[in-house]
Image (cartoon, rainbow, N blue to C red):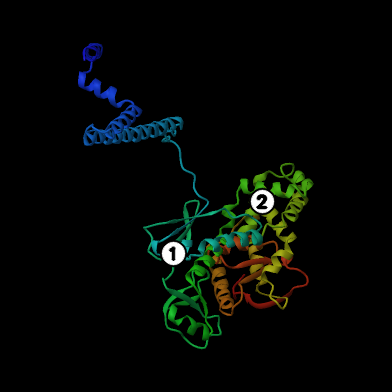
Amino acid sequence: VVSTAAGMIVTRAASEANLGQEMAGQLFVHPKALGSAAGILAFFGVIPGLPHIAFLTMAALAGAGAFGLIAMRRREEAREAEEEARRAVPAPAPEKADTVAPLDPIELEVGYGLIPLVDAEQNGDLLDRIRAIRRQLAVELGMVVPSLHIRDNLQLKPAQYSLLIRGNEVGGGEVVAHHYLAMDPGTASGPIEGIPTKDPAFGLPAHWVPEADKERAQFMGYTVVDPSTVVATHLTELLKSHAHELLGRQEAQKLLDGLAKTHPKVVEDVVPALLPLGVVVRVMQNLLRERVPVRDLATILETLADFASITKDSDTLTEYVRQALYRTITRQYTGSDGSLPLLTLDPRIEERIAQAVQGTHPGSYLTLDPGFFQRLMGAIRPAVESVVQRGYTPILLCSPVIRSAMKRLTERFLPNLVILSHNEIANHVRIQSIGTVRWSDAA
């Protein structure tokens, strides 16, 4: 007792904490000590003649305290390890106010009602269709279309979608949930009931019919497609129309690097020896703007090498390249019977336009009075509408001298009108004239 009292007095004098806190801290700092005490008390509890209940109760309390302290110690160690790991990871640098997030090349925004079309867990197949579209365009156009990012936009209508290129909307549409788009290919046996609309890709008359009427519409001869196919087809046409906006210097350089592996000499002789990369890019963009593939890049560069000593104007070089790609251009519009249906241009109109083409260095421009332009559009538009109603692709044939000028004149008001020159048609193709653009006072 004297020794214990002396120890307590020494402890009290050497510590700033009170005696009770110091004793509790010493007692509970080591869980193994409590565990040993629990074992000793349990041993005393089974010795005959000693108070069993008292010793066993204290043994249980000491054992529970030991287990509790061990669990607490483990939690503290885990928390300390987590804190050390967190401190080891460098904190993200604060975002500067002068940084601008890069724009996605292509984005597809959808209303919340179209989320099932892009969600694979809900059997949506639009993502797979988009992958197939990119592969298809790589084959058809000869360029790799960037990845398309999809996100929902609550500002759109539930069944609305919108395609953006570099942050700007270039097209979109709206579908009807749980309906199919029925279009008459010209062989339908009769009218069909549904919601009148237009095919967003081609602007053709169509109807949205409920799922219950799908088989009936097919039986009547209508072409019936689901909403996912409608969106995918529209996206394909939009990407084809704006492919030239997706091809820049970086993308063109990758194509040239790929060609250099098989045709190193032609790439070395053209870029940058004869032409800067920017001119080559503009030529490729001009081709894609009129849906001429750039897949035959070797022929394109060979042609540029042949004519770069004559001109450095990208528009003029484009015309030379188009003539070199005449088989590729002709194949796009030739029918299965080998014929090429097209419109011809009155020679007097061709002569008037040729006189209005003023050449400069570089490039050229037109000097047409507004009255002539209005009469020209008034003559071309009904001819094109008649051709489309008969199921033909609107193609206008003209001389090579004015082909580029005619395209510039008509592309804003008649973007789907194809302008071909005589030098862009293969010899084996049979030309089928289906109309002539003329007016009485052309002179």
Quadrant where the N terminus sits is top left
* Few, some or many residues within 10 Å of mark 1 (<14, 14–19, 20+): some
Quadrant in the picture for residue 129 = bottom right
Q: Which residue ends up furthest to the front in the rendered image? A: 48
Residue drawn 31% across and 25% down? Answer: 29
Secondary structure beneath label 2: helix
Q: Position of residue 21 (x, y in %)?
A: 22, 22
Taking depth in this image into account, of 135 and 440 the one nearest to the observer is 135
Taking depth in this image into account, of 45 and 158 the one nearest to the observer is 45
Residue 361 visible in the current orientation: no
As drawn, is 114 to the left or to the right of 293?
A: left
Q: Is residue 341 above or below residue 238?
A: below
Closer to the eye: label 1 or 2? 1
Secondary structure beneath label 1: helix
Circle 1 is placed at which residue position? 116
Q: Position of residue 136 (x, y in %)?
A: 62, 62
Quadrant where the C terminus sits is bottom right
Quadrant in the picture for residue 61 = top left
Residue 241 visible in the current orientation: yes
Residue drawn 40% across and 57% down? Answer: 153
Q: Disc 1 residue type?
A: Pro
In the picture, the disc for residue 314 is: 2
Q: Disc 2 residue type?
A: Ser
As drawn, is 431 to the left or to the right of 391?
A: right
Lower sequence index among marks 1 and 2: 1
